Image (spheres, helix red, strand yellow):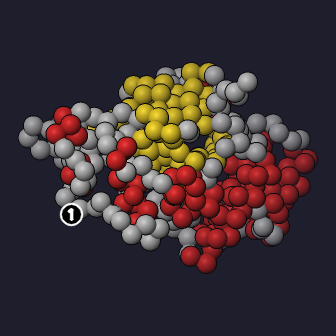
Amino acid sequence: MVEAPLIEVENLVVAFANPSRRAGEKATFRAVDDVRFAIQAGEVFGIVGESGSGKTTLGKTMLRLYRPQAGTIRYAGADITTLGDAGLRPFRRDLQMIFQDPLSSFNPRVRIGKALALPLRLHRLCAPAELDGEVERRLARVGLAVRFKDRYPHEMSGGQLQRVAIARALALRPRLIVADEPVSKLDVSVRAQILNLFRDVQQETGVALVFVTHDLRVARYLCHRIAVMFFGRIVEIGPTEDIFARPRHPYTRQLLATIGHRPESDAAVEPAPPADATGCRYRSRCAHADATCARHVPRLAACAADRQVACHHFETF
C-alpha cells in the first residue's frame, strides 16, 4: 500500500498586486500559477529556480504564511487552504520555517537562550525547571557551546545564527520544515557546514524538508527529488539524479548548463513573457518553440516513471 502524502498541493494560485503594470496588463500577477505536487513524510524535496521564479512564495504558502487565491493545500489529509489563525493553530507546531536571513528572524532584544525556550514553553514541551537544560541540549545538537545562550543575535555570526534557527525549528519536533535559501547569505566556507547539519538532523529526525534554493549543486547534495520553477510554474519534477542525468525541459537544461553539468544551453537574451501571457512562458528563450507553444500552456504531465514535465516537445529531448 502506498503511503498517503504528508502534504499535497493542487492547482495552487498565489497572486499579488501589480503596481508597475503598463497599459493593457492585469492589475495582479500570479507569483504561483497552477502548481501541484505531493511530498512524502521524511522526504527532502527541493524547489529550484532563478530569482523571481516564485519558489519562496510557494514555500511560504505551503505553510500558510500566505493565503492562496485558488487551489488546495492538504496537510496529513486535512485541508488547510482557507483556515484562519485559529484554525491553523493546531498545525503550527508541525509546520516550521527557516528563513534566508537568520538575523531578521530573531528579536534583537531577546537573548538566544530565551528565543529557544519560548516555543518550548508556549507548547508546554517540558517543565519550567527543565527549560535551561533543554535549551543547552538544543544548542549542543547544532554544534554551539552553552555560552551562546546568553548572547544577543547581533553578537553572533550568520552561520551561528542559522544553527540557532535550525535548533529553534526542530525544538517543536515538526513533521515538515521549509528552508528558504538558508545558506545563500553565508560565507562559502560556512555553507558546507550548515548543509551537513541539515543533512544530519534530517536523517536523525526523519522530518520532511522542503529546501528552496537557486543553487542546483545544493539541491543535488541534499534532495531526494526536485521541482524546477520558472515564472510561477513548475516545469519539471523528478528524482534528483534522474533530472541531472536527463533533464526533460529546456529550462532545466539551461539551469544545469550554468553549473557546467551540461555544455548545451537553450538560454537566449530575450526576457520571459509576462505572467499573464498566453502559451508557454519559456518560449522566448527556447530554440524549440513553435505555434503550439505560443497558443497553449503546457501542463505538467508524466514523461517517465516518477518524472513529470510541462513541455509540448519533451519527447524530442
Q: Residue furthest bottom?
A: 189
Which residue, given by chain and number where applicable, does mark 1 sit on?
269
Q: Nearer the viewer, residue 5 or 187?
A: 5
Specify whether 186 is left or right of 127.
Answer: left
Percent across and percent down for residue 43 are: 66, 44
Q: Classify residue 23 by image quadrant.
A: top left
Q: How many numbered discs sit on the rendered protein?
A: 1
Q: What is the three-letter code of the residue carrying label 1?
A: Val
Q: Residues within 10 Å of mark 1 (few under 14, many from 20)?
A: few
Residue 104 versus residue 304 in the image, above or below: below
The residue at the point 77 percent across, 68 percent down is 144
The residue at the point 76 percent across, 52 percent down is 203
Percent across and percent down for residue 3 are: 70, 28
Q: Residue furthest front?
A: 316
Specify whether 285 is left or right of 200.
Answer: left
Specify whether 1 is left or right of 195.
Answer: right
Q: Is residue 41 visible?
A: yes
Percent across and percent down for residue 224 are: 63, 50
* Element under disc 1: loop
Residue 203 versus residue 112 in the image, above or below: above
- The quarter of the rendered structure image containing the N terminus is top right
Q: Nearer the viewer, residue 153 or 8?
A: 8
The residue at the point 51 percent across, 52 percent down is 243
The residue at the point 37 percent across, 43 percent down is 315
Q: Classify residue 74 by image quadrant.
A: top right
Residue 22 versus residue 102 in the image, above or below: above
Q: Residue furthest left?
A: 23
Q: Classify residue 217 by image quadrant.
A: bottom right
Residue 180 versus residue 27 in the image, above or below: below
Q: Is residue 171 visible?
A: no
